[in-house]
Image: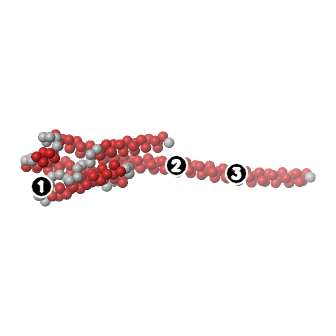
């Protein structure tokens, strides 16, 4: 009988060791899975933050700077004309000197801005995929393309056309600023997690 108790004790000890080992490995496995999941979540969060930084640094902030520069120059141009509208002044008929001044201003001031904005528009895949901003960027692309054609005509000494058929998109800067704020808020929310 004593031997049988002794055998039972040995069996219980062996089973205990096996169960403890299985539980230990199981617990270790699930802990490692938890750790990996936490690392994956952190990596996803960091990737999202990195992408937001890329959107801001490579597209939105440089675009905002160029749009503000363009707006500042445009307001200066408008001050030089009677009604504050160069279009109405041209429609009423302005002299040849004003036309030449406009063309020089476009080539020296706005063309470099257009070139810089065109470079940024090549990165428009970084823009938020919202209908309003995409439509404004389409209009801006068309506006710049029209002026590129006009500049080509001017280089060929055909200076009869002075304005793009597609006007600069109104309120684009507001949409850009709104997207910048949205991205900054999204980044802050990610950093808080």
Residue topped by disc 1: 160
Image position, residue 113 (x, y; %): 23, 49
Image position, residue 35 (x, y; %): 58, 49
Residue topped by disc 3: 23
Foreground: 73 or 32? 73
Foreground: 12 or 115? 115
Residue topped by disc 2: 41
Nearer to us of marks 2 and 1 is 1
Nearer to us of marks 1 and 3 is 1
The chosen color scheme is secondary structure
Query: In what element is the residue under mark 3?
Result: helix
Q: Using the numbered discs, state the Cα–Cα distance from disc 2 to disc 3 in whole angstroms.
A: 27 Å
54 to the left or right of 22: left
Image position, residue 73 (x, y; %): 20, 43
Query: In what element is the residue under mark 1?
Result: loop
Label 1: how many residues lie within 10 Å, few (<14), some (14-19) or many (20+)? few
168 to the left or right of 22: left
Foreground: 177 or 93? 93
Q: Using the numbered discs, state the Cα–Cα distance from disc 2 to disc 1 in whole angstroms.
A: 60 Å
100 to the left or right of 48: left
């Amino acid at each position: 009988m004593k031997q049988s108790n002794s055998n039972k004790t040995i069996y219980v000890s062996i089973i205990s060791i096996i169960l403890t080992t299985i539980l230990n490995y199981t617990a270790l496995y699930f802990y490692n899975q938890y750790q990996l999941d936490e690392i994956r979540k952190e990596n996803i969060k960091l990737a999202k933050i990195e992408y937001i930084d890329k959107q801001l640094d490579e597209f939105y902030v440089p675009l905002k700077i160029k749009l503000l520069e363009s707006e500042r120059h445009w307001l200066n141009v408008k001050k030089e004309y009677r009604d504050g509208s160069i279009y109405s002044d041209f429609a009423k008929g302005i002299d040849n000197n004003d036309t030449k001044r406009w063309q020089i201003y476009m080539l020296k001031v706005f063309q470099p801005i257009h070139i810089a904005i065109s470079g940024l528009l090549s990165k428009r895949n970084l823009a938020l995929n919202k209908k309003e901003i995409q439509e404004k960027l389409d209009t801006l692309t068309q506006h710049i393309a029209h002026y590129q054609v006009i500049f080509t005509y001017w280089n060929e000494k055909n200076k009869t056309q002075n304005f793009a058929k597609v006007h600069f998109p109104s309120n684009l800067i507001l949409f850009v600023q709104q997207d910048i704020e949205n991205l900054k808020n999204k980044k802050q929310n990610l950093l808080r997690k």
